[in-house]
Amino acid sequence: MFNNISFILHKPQLSENIGACARAIKNFNFDKLILVDPKPSFPNDKIIATSVGAKDIIKKSKVFDTMEPALEKIDYLIATTSRFRNKNIKHIQLKDLKKINYNKKIGFLFGSEASGLSNNEISYANYTMQIPSNSEFKSLNLSHSVIIVAQAVFNLLNLNLKIYSKSKKITQASKKQIQLMLNLCIKNLEDRNFFKPKEKRAIMLENLRSIFYRMELSEKETRILSSVFASLSKKVD
């Protein structure tokens, strides 16, 4: 199950924090670190130096320019945030992590040091999660956030919790499958000039993405919806 967990850093700004995050996940037996559009060159000497023994984690880390390819192999995405979001998305606490099915590919998403995660990044998530802290001072260092989550999940996996799982006949759709379906939907909507006025296109896409990502669709459901969207592009005789 440890191999199913990925820690995803979105636009990390400091080399020291990237190295410290690698060290943090290795402390708790995890080895998958993903970076999306990091500000420093990757890897660099400062990252390796601050990883302190987690050089192997740095070497096999994957770097992506944008979110979508980074999430292709993720089944459930949990976005960490210190702010409540006024969006129709499930909010969980650290204690709720025991309800997650760790037989699936789980990704924990962390925002940049300066600005955290925007609503656009949140729209890719199945859940948002807040780390309990001082209500008047919620700002946590990136590597500290990572180590808190890593330690919590480490404890859960070592307890060998009997985790609820759905019928084996039902296969959860991957993020990649959902993205392909969503891209088909968006293309058809764009062909019909749906996204107007143009200045509202970004927020409309964000809301549309959020709807599909939080639905926890099965592969079969994703295929059905893809067929529906594909049929909409056909001309009626």
Image (tube, helix red, strand yellow):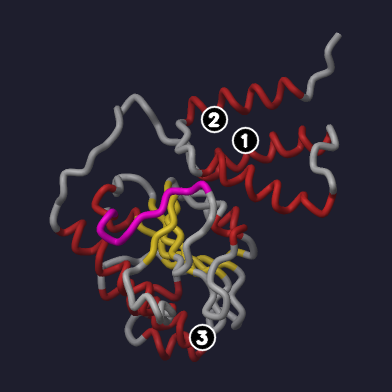
Relative to 125, is 148 on the left or the right?
left
**Mark 1 highlights which residue?**
181
**Mark 2 highlights which residue?**
222
Local crowd size for mark 3, using a 10 Å CA cut-off: few (<14), some (14–19), many (≥20): many
Residue 208: x and y, percent? 64, 42
Residue 181: x and y, percent? 62, 35
- Disc 1 residue type? Met
Q: Residue at x 39, y 73 (%)?
A: 57
For this orientation, the residue located farthest to the top is 237
Q: Choose the circle earlier in sequence order: 3 or 2.
A: 3
- Disc 2 residue type? Thr
Q: Secondary structure at mark 3?
A: helix
- Asked which quadrant contains residue 182, the reply is top right
Labels 2 and 1 touching (C-beta < 8 A): yes
Residue 122: x and y, percent? 54, 57
Residue 123: x and y, percent? 57, 52
The verdict on residue 83 being magenta is no
Task: Please determine whether, in this image, residue 136 is positioned above or below residue 110.
Answer: below
Q: Which segment is the magenta one?
A: 88-96
How far apart marks 2 and 1 lie (CA) works out to 7 Å
**Mark on residue 15?**
3
Task: Please determine whether, in this image, residue 162 is positioned above or below residue 17.
Answer: above
- Asked which quadrant contains residue 21, the reply is bottom left
**Mark on residue 131?**
none
Q: Choose the circle earlier in sequence order: 1 or 3.
A: 3
Q: Secondary structure at mark 1?
A: helix
Q: Residue at x 23, y 64 (%)?
A: 154
Viewer-nearest residue: 104 or 163: 163
Q: Secondary structure at mark 2?
A: helix
